Image (cartoon, grey):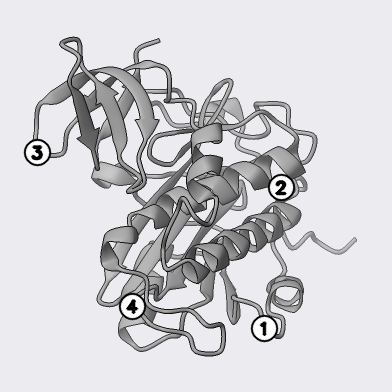
Amino acid sequence: MASSPYTDLDRPPLSARALQRALVVPGGMWHRVDVVGETGSTNADVAEAARNGAAEGLVVVAERQVTGRGRRDRQWVSPARAGLTLSVLLRPGLADADRGWRPAPQRAWGWLPLLAGVALMEAVQRVAEVDASLKWPNDLLLEQGKAAGILAEVAGDAVVVGVGLNVTTRPEELPETTGLPATSLRVAGAKSTDRDPLLRALLRGFARWYGGWRETGGDAELCGLLGAYRRGCSTLGRDVRVLLPEGGELTGAATTVDGDGQLVVRTADGVERRVSAGDVLHVR
């Protein structure tokens, strides 16, 4: 009997050939989809490709990532083929005459990780058929806890957006956390944990939202992204504690997300503060 090419039968490898054929299409956004068995960090790989002149639309997917990280340099750990770990290359500051896209102003680039969050939430809801929401700015929440994180980094005139989603991770494989507990689609009882259609849905949704965002010059409200984000953000309407990057914290009620993607927090004295970066803890 021939040995299996992978040891865990509910964790089949992704087919780069099938993904390339499905996603790299004439007039489409994605021009190359690479699937690697193992890498240190897909964000680092794509950032290096960006510095070497790679065009917008590169996707790098890793079956196993050994030095992945999230915000505040937190480590993102997942067993081989148990999740989706990928990064995409964007060049929002460059015009695209073929598509009629003018450069998006750099002040609008902060919307890109939120855009990725909306695309991921929609893909999970549609393919896995589980309830999902976003904790500002871009953590994917299921009822049981956090299932995914998104990290965007600027590399010269490019933006690299990385996504890490727990798919078939078992309870005993989930890392211990000091904040929200980690979870996976499997733990949440997803109808499907097939990574291939999840990845296709994510990248197609990302391309659709990104195209609309670019067509409007990076206007999140005009392209509908702001409304979609607000509808999917479970942070809004809650009392929150925000750990600020410069130190200190802010507490109050999260009232909305503004046109720049900032979280608006009303403090106990009635003052509205806008937060562009920080770790949010849901108090209730």
Q: Residue at (76%, 45%) from the top-left corner? A: 10
Q: How much space separates mark 2 and mark 1, taking CA atoms? A: 37 Å
Q: Which residue type carries mark 1?
A: Gly
Q: Which residue type carries mark 2?
A: Asp
Q: Residue beneath label 4, please?
A: 48
Number of other residues with Cα within 10 Å of mark 2, as a class: few under 14, some 14 to 19, many 20 or more: few
Q: Which residue type carries mark 4?
A: Glu
Q: Residue beneath label 2, please?
A: 8
Mark 3 and mark 4 lie on one chain; the one further toward the N terminus is: 4
Q: Secondary structure at mark 1?
A: loop
State left or right for residue 177 relative to residue 7.
Answer: left
Number of other residues with Cα within 10 Å of mark 1, as a class: few under 14, some 14 to 19, many 20 or more: few
Mark 3 and mark 1 lie on one chain; the one further toward the N terminus is: 1
Residue nearest the observer in this picture, 216 or 85: 216
Is 232 placed above or below 87 here?
above
Is 46 placed above or below 171 here?
below
